[in-house]
Image (cartoon, rainbow, N blue to C red):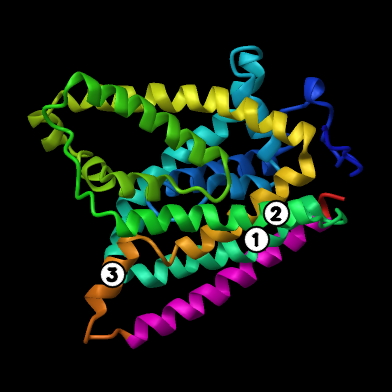
């Protein structure tokens, strides 16, 4: 049965066929760039969800529309996606050069900051279901959504697959990389799912990160076939999954966002519970770093405050 959507349309939210992707001003373009930045960082920082940030910026449905209609309305969609793509590249570079180095030094504190930002912005997600009736099925979907990212992290932490290898891949490995690229696309479109957690669970996170070097490329040029398969699978996932998510929101908006809200909250928990973090906790051992714990708490609270302030600002200026 199709859900009746009683929520009034927000400003700028036209029917799907008439959805405008044009940025209103430079500020909106900057938002797109920042969204891309978080999408890029999501590859490095476990638990960070680019799609959750898209909801905060009120760009989520436009993002889904742009990916789902890229072939149909190419120029229109590319203009919208270009700032996001540029931001994503910057996010990847910053992630590899700066954030990754900070994570190696004070991983708990860095993760705490990002977790605080995600938690402080959570009201932006619940705004999507404000005033909706909480029924038993919707509550159940919220709890299921909450459990999904935690379950993925639990599996990645408890299944010791070891690191996979990218060298000497057989033909069936390339099919696996196509599927893996598709799955990574799903994690970028469904709030709460972490590409990092999936890659860790399958043992490909560290090998892929370590493969990004000129030396490695010179010794293993076949890795570019791996990259190509991942990219093809990723693009296919973006084009198809985005349409599916758009349909869900169109027909069952409130129910879908109850699930999304649960997944967004669950992703915050997984930032402190994943393979990398458990390894980091183990390194603390007898040499417990009290100063880093205090720093992490301060950054966590500061992140919550900063993100919530931004959400309130967005609420005020989106009316």
Residue 56 in view in this figure: no
At x 16%, y 22%, the residue is 170
Q: Which residue is mark 2?
A: 125
Query: Was residue 303 drawn as part of the magenta stretch in this picture?
Result: yes
Q: Are marks 1 and 2 in contact (CB under 8 Å)?
A: yes
- Which residue is at 56% across, 69% downward? 303
Residue 280 badge: 3
**Element under label 2?**
helix
Per the image, label 3 sits on a secondary structure element best described as helix
Crowding at dot 1, Cα within 10 Å, few <14 / some 14-19 / many 20+, comes out as many
Residue 189, compared with residue 279, is above or below; it is above
Quadrant in the picture for residue 253: top right
- Asked whether, in this view, residue 67 is left or right of residue 248, the answer is left
**Which one is nearer the viewer's eye here, 35 or 279?**
279
Name the outermost residue toward the top. 72
Q: Is disc 1 placed on a helix, strand or loop?
A: loop
Residue 237 among magenta residues:
no
Depth check, front residue: 265 or 91? 265
Asked whether residue 230 is in view, the answer is yes
Residue tagged by mark 1?
121
Quadrant of the rendered image containing residue 211: top left
Q: Residue at x 44, y 34 (%)?
A: 183
- Magenta extent: 290-316
What separation in Å lies between label 1 and label 2 (alpha carbons)? 7 Å
Whole-Å distance between the Cαs marked 2 and 3?
30 Å
């Amino acid at each position: 049965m199709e859900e009746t959507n009683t929520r009034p349309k927000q400003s700028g939210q036209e029917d799907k066929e008439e959805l405008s992707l044009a940025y209103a001003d430079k500020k909106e373009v900057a938002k797109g760039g920042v969204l891309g930045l978080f999408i890029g960082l999501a590859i490095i920082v476990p638990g960070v969800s680019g799609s959750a940030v898209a909801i905060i910026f009120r760009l989520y449905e436009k993002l889904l529309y742009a990916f789902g209609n890229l072939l149909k309305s190419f120029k229109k969609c590319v203009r919208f996606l270009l700032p996001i793509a540029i931001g994503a590249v910057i996010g990847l570079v910053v992630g590899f050069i700066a954030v990754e180095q900070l994570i190696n030094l004070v991983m708990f504190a860095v993760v705490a900051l990002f977790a605080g930002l995600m938690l402080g912005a959570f009201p932006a997600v619940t705004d999507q279901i404000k005033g909706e009736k909480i029924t038993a099925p919707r509550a159940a979907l919220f709890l299921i959504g909450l459990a999904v990212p935690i379950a993925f992290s639990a599996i990645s932490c408890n299944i010791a697959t070891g690191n996979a290898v990218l060298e000497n891949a057989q033909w069936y490995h390339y099919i696996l990389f196509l599927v893996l690229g598709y799955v990574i696309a799903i994690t970028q479109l469904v709030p709460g799912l972490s590409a990092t957690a999936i890659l860790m669970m399958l043992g490909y996170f560290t090998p892929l990160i370590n493969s990004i070097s000129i030396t490695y490329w010179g010794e293993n040029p076949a890795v570019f076939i791996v990259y190509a398969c991942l990219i093809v699978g990723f693009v296919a996932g973006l084009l198809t999954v985005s349409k599916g998510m758009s349909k869900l929101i169109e027909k069952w908006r409130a129910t879908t966002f109850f699930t999304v809200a649960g997944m967004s909250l669950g992703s915050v928990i997984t930032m402190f519970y994943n393979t990398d973090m458990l390894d980091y906790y183990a390194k603390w051992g007898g040499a417990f770093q009290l100063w880093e714990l205090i720093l992490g708490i301060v950054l966590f609270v500061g992140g919550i405050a900063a993100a919530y302030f931004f959400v309130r600002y967005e609420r005020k200026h989106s009316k």
